[in-house]
Structure formats: C-alpha cells, structure tokens
Amino acid sequence: MASITLGGNPVHTSGELPAVGSQLADFKLVQNDLSVASLSNFAGKKLVLNIFPSVDTGTCATSVRKFNASASGLENTTVLCISRDLPFAQKRFCGAEGLENVVNLSDFQTGAFGKANGLEIVDGPLAGLHSRAIIVVDADGKVLHTEQVAEIANEPNYEAALAAL
C-alpha cells in the first residue's frame, strides 16, 4: 500500500507499482470504440502509461495534453492514457482538444488494472479511482520506470518518464 496525499490529506492505494525490471502484467481495458485492448495489442512497442483519476480534472487533462504533445516525436512508442472514466468521456475530451497522439483506455468495468498494479485509491473522496502514476515499459513489456505521484493534484515528472525510453 502506497501512502499519497490529496490536497495534503493522506490517502492510500491498494498496493505498490510494478517493480522496475519486472514484466508488466497483461490487462484488458476498454477502448473508445468499446472494444477491449490488452498488452498484446501493443506488442513490440515501448509504452508510456499515463494513469490518472479522471480526465475531467485540471491536472489529469494537462497530463494528457503534455504527453500528446510529446508522443508524436517518440520512436516506436505509444502513450496510453488510463483512467476509470467512461470511454465516452475520454473520447469527448480528446476530440474537443484535438488530441490524436495518445490512446485512451478505460478500466471502468472492473477496476482490475488498477488493483493489479497497486493504483486503486482505497480511501478518501477519490476512493475507487486510480492514483496518478506513470509506468514506462520497453518493447518486450519490461518495466523501465515508475512514478507514483505523491500528491494527486501534482503533475508527474514528464522528463523522467520520457528519459526512461
């Protein structure tokens, strides 16, 4: 269990992020068209997993915008923006913002991705949503970098995530 804060108040997650050097566990997440994507859909690609509570908050929206801006210049890399938002909300946000360089994935059905990766917030007003975190994996699915953002309202360290690629 990780201890993080929301507005300076302590909250906790369901576990710890995957260890650097470990294999990212397979997942089943819902795409904007309601089809299911798994890790195999991105085989052979490096991945930046931008994980956050909801695209309808300022910091989460900023992270999607910033990674979208970086994504077009990344070789053999896909940025996955993962939350428990409904796919319709993710699609609406990216459409309204003109963001086309990231892939939205939703864990709304079961929250299994969040639970498996220690991301689920277990107490406080955002209980049930994902914490703000970054996981970077190589083309073979090996974890290269993780960041559990200590204060949910803060942005992740974009430079560290991209440098891990």
Image: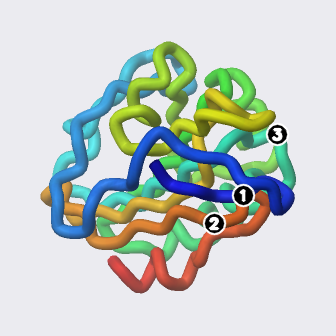
Query: Is residue 138 positioned above or below 33 on the image?
Result: below
Dot 1, how many residues are within 10 Å of its Cα: few (below 14), some (14-19), or many (20+)? some
Residue 157 on image: x %, y %: 59, 77
Residue 108 on image: x %, y %: 56, 20
- The residue positioned 54% from the left and 84% from the top of the image is 159
| Residue that numbered label 2 is attached to | 150
Which mark, residue 149? none
Q: Tag 3 or tag 2, which sits nearer the N-term? A: 3
The image quarter in which residue 13 lies = top right
Whether residue 104 is visible: no
- The residue positioned 17% from the left and 67% from the top of the image is 21
Q: Given the image, on which type of amino acid does mark 2 rest? A: Ala
Looking at the image, which is closer to me, 85 or 14?
14
Q: What element carries label 2?
A: loop
Looking at the image, which is closer to me, 145 or 94?
145
The image quarter in which residue 42 lies = top left
Q: Gap between marks 3 and 1, in whole Å?
A: 19 Å
- The residue positioned 52% from the left and 68% from the top of the image is 72
Q: Is mark 3 on a helix, strand or loop?
A: loop
Horizontal side of 30 relative to 22 (left or right) equals: right
Residue 14 on image: x %, y %: 47, 39
Which mark, residue 56? 3
Q: Gap between marks 2 and 1, in whole Å?
A: 6 Å
| Residue that numbered label 1 is attached to | 5
Dot 3, how many residues are within 10 Å of its Cα: few (below 14), some (14-19), or many (20+)? few
Q: Given the image, on which type of amino acid does mark 3 rest? A: Asp
Looking at the image, which is closer to me, 68 or 48?
48
